[in-house]
Amino acid sequence: MAAGSVLGLAAPAPAAGGPAVGDVVVFSTEAQPLDTYVDPAGCQQLPIVAHVLTNQTDRPVKVYGNPFCLGPSVVVQPGYGTHVPGGAGSFSA
């Protein structure tokens, strides 16, 4: 238990309130390039035909089913991805 406490203290915590460091990458279709959000902060509207979001930042991002980052969300941890709602979704970092 003591070792776990020490390890928890050794890992640097992301700065609260600042932008996430890294990229959020969104795949929409095979016919268009990836959308990359570098060091995203705040609410970002997803492309209309967004299909998959990958979180390559240093902190969790939340995915919403509306363009306003309101209501229920799915949390995507760093290094993971998720399918996203098409048409009017958003994410916040």
Image (cartoon, rainbow, N blue to C red):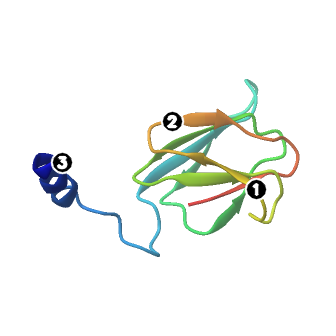
Work out which residue is located at the far bottom of the displayed protein and give it: 17
Task: Give the residue pinned by disc 1.
Answer: 72
Q: Quadrant of the C terminus?
A: bottom right
Residue 84, position as x, y percentages in the image: 74, 39
What label does residue 4 carry, if any? Answer: 3
- At label 3, the amino acid type is Gly
From this view, report whether residue 50 is shown above or below residue 13: above
Task: Give the residue pinned by disc 2.
Answer: 80
Residue 49, position as x, y percentages in the image: 82, 39
From this view, report whether residue 87 is shown above or below residue 69: above
Residue lying at 49% horizontally and 49% vertically, measured from the top left: 23
- At label 2, the amino acid type is Tyr
Taking depth in this image into account, of 72 and 85 the one nearest to the observer is 72
In which quadrant of the rendered view does residue 30 lie? top right
- At label 1, the amino acid type is Pro
Residue lying at 81% horizontally and 41% vertically, measured from the top left: 85
Q: Earlier in the sequence, mark 2 or mark 1?
A: 1
Binning the other alpha carbons within 10 Å of mark 2 as few (below 14), some (14 to 19) or many (20 upward) gives few
Mark 3 element type: helix
Q: Disc 2 vs disc 1: Cβ atoms closer than 8 Å? A: no
